[in-house]
């Protein structure tokens, strides 16, 4: 057993936390649909993207319950 590679729990914890962050994910997806046809390249969803991952990171940091 000592030769086994350690398992990174980050991906597992992130997946477990995603259902708790549905609202920011929904807002991000709505934004993506709004700007997907923007030919100017000026519109983006960076704020919504970071809001979603901030929610996931916060959940992971306090531990999934």
Image (spheres, rainbow, N blue to C red):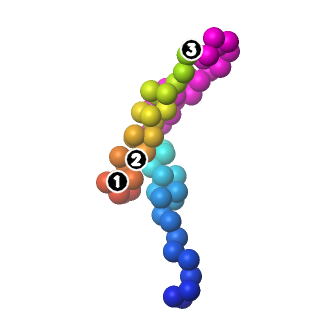
Residue 42 marker: 3
Q: Main secondary structure of the magenta part?
A: helix
Q: Find the distance from the CA under tag 3 to the CA under tag 2.
A: 28 Å
Mark 2, residue position: 57
Above or below, 59 relative to 44: below
- x%, y% of residue 33? 62, 21
Please tell me whether mark 1 sits on a helix, a strand or a loop.
Answer: helix
Above or below, 43 relative to 8: above
Above or below, 10 relative to 25: below
Please tell me whether mark 3 sits on a helix, a strand or a loop.
Answer: loop
Mark 1, residue position: 61
Q: Find the distance from the CA under tag 1 to the CA under tag 3.
A: 33 Å
Q: Residues within 10 Å of mark 3 (few under 14, many from 20)?
A: few
- x%, y% of residue 50? 44, 34
Q: Residues within 10 Å of mark 1 (few under 14, many from 20)?
A: few
Q: Given contact means CB atoms under 8 Å apart, are the residues at marks 2 and 1 in contact?
A: yes
Please tell me whether mark 2 sits on a helix, a strand or a loop.
Answer: helix
- x%, y% of residue 23? 45, 32
- x%, y% of residue 61? 34, 53
Outermost residue toward the top?
Answer: 40
Which residues are the magenta region? 20-41
Q: Residue at x 48, y 45 (%)?
A: 18
Residue 20 marker: none
Depth order, front residue of 44/65? 44
Mark nearer the viewer, 3 or 2: 3
Q: Residues within 10 Å of mark 2 (few under 14, many from 20)?
A: some
Above or below, 26 relative to 63: above
Is residue 4 inside the magenta stretch? no
Depth order, front residue of 60/5? 5
């Amino acid at each position: 057993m000592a030769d086994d590679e350690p398992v990174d729990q980050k991906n597992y914890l992130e997946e477990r936390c995603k259902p708790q962050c549905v609202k920011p994910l929904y807002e991000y997806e709505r934004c993506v649909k709004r700007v997907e046809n923007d030919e100017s390249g000026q519109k983006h969803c960076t704020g919504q993207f970071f809001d979603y991952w901030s929610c996931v990171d916060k959940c992971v940091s306090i531990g999934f319950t």
